[in-house]
Amino acid sequence: MRQRLGLASCAVILLAATGDAGQGPTLRAVMRDKLTTAQTLLGAVVRHDFSQMELFARQLERIPYAEVVSWQAAADRDYVEHAVALLGAARNLREAAAARNGDAAVREYSALVTACTGCHSHVRKMRTISVPIR
Ligand code: HEC
């Protein structure tokens, strides 16, 4: 019986540890979702499918600014700028689609990808220099 209880509490601790992994899993899920949405959006942009463009650009816009910034405990200025650039490009892309402007949609899609990669390289850089020195 004692052993059983021990196993049960182990399971509880394991569960708690997984649940306690901070923002990691949520951030991952949001990012994977963004990747899928951005890929679908690319398909719409190259096909000049304006209604799909509006739909998927709106989905990217739906992630509120406050949430984007909360992904980093201490979001610095550059991080915030990339976040703003992402939301701005998604909004502009939706507006280009509403205006049935295919060229503008391509430009905004490119700005969107630049925001993704810009933020990611910023995060990588910050990580490299935040390694604690002992
Ligand atoms: C403002 C910053 C920012 C922007 C903009 C951004 N990301 Fe991310 N992304 C992150 C951070 C932070 C992580 C987590 C990195 C880590 O912990 O490894 C991440 C991780 C990811 C991952 C990996 C998820 C996993 O499974 O681990 C993918 C895929 C991704 N982002 C896609 C995108 C796409 C696509 C876009 C643009 C549409 C985008 N991101 C824009 C900050 C950003």
Image (cartoon, rainbow, N blue to C red):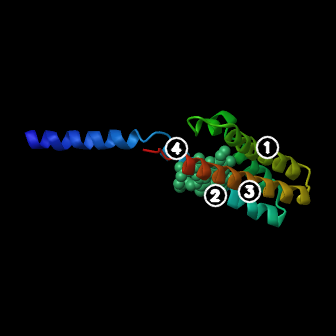
Q: Which is closer to the viewer, label 4 or label 3?
A: 3
Q: Amino acid at mark 3?
A: Val
The residue carrying pointer 4 sits among few (fewer than 14), some (14 to 19) or many (20 or more) residues within 10 Å by Cα, namely: few
Helix, strand or loop for disc 1: helix
Judge the density around disc 1: few (<14), some (14-19), many (≥20) Cα neighbours within 10 Å. some
Residue 30 percent coordinates (x, y): 58, 47
Query: Tags 4 and 1 in contact by the CB under 8 Å rule?
Result: no
The earlier-in-sequence mark between 2 and 1 is 2
**Residue 57 higher or lower than 17, as above or below:** below
Which amino acid type is shown beneath numbered disc 1?
A: Gly
Write down the residue under mark 4. Answer: 26
Q: Nearer the viewer, mark 2 or mark 1?
A: 1
Please tell me which of labels 4 and 1 falls first in the chain. Answer: 4
Q: CA distance from mark 4 to mark 3?
A: 21 Å
Q: Which of the pair 91/133 is nearer the observer?
A: 133
Residue 113: mark? 3
- At 92% across and 56% down in the image, what residue appears? 101
Q: Which residue is mark 2?
A: 36
| Distance between mark 3 and mark 2 Cα atoms | 13 Å
Q: Which residue is mark 1?
A: 88
Name which of mark 4 and mark 3 comes first in the sequence.
4
The CA distance from mark 2 to mark 1 is: 19 Å
Q: Earlier in the sequence, mark 3 or mark 2?
A: 2
* CA distance separating discs 4 and 2: 16 Å
Q: Are marks 4 and 2 in contact (CB under 8 Å)?
A: no
Query: Which of the two labelled residues, at mark 4 and mark 2, occupies the earlier sequence position?
Result: 4
Res 27 → quadrant: top right
Residue at disc 4, secondary structure: helix
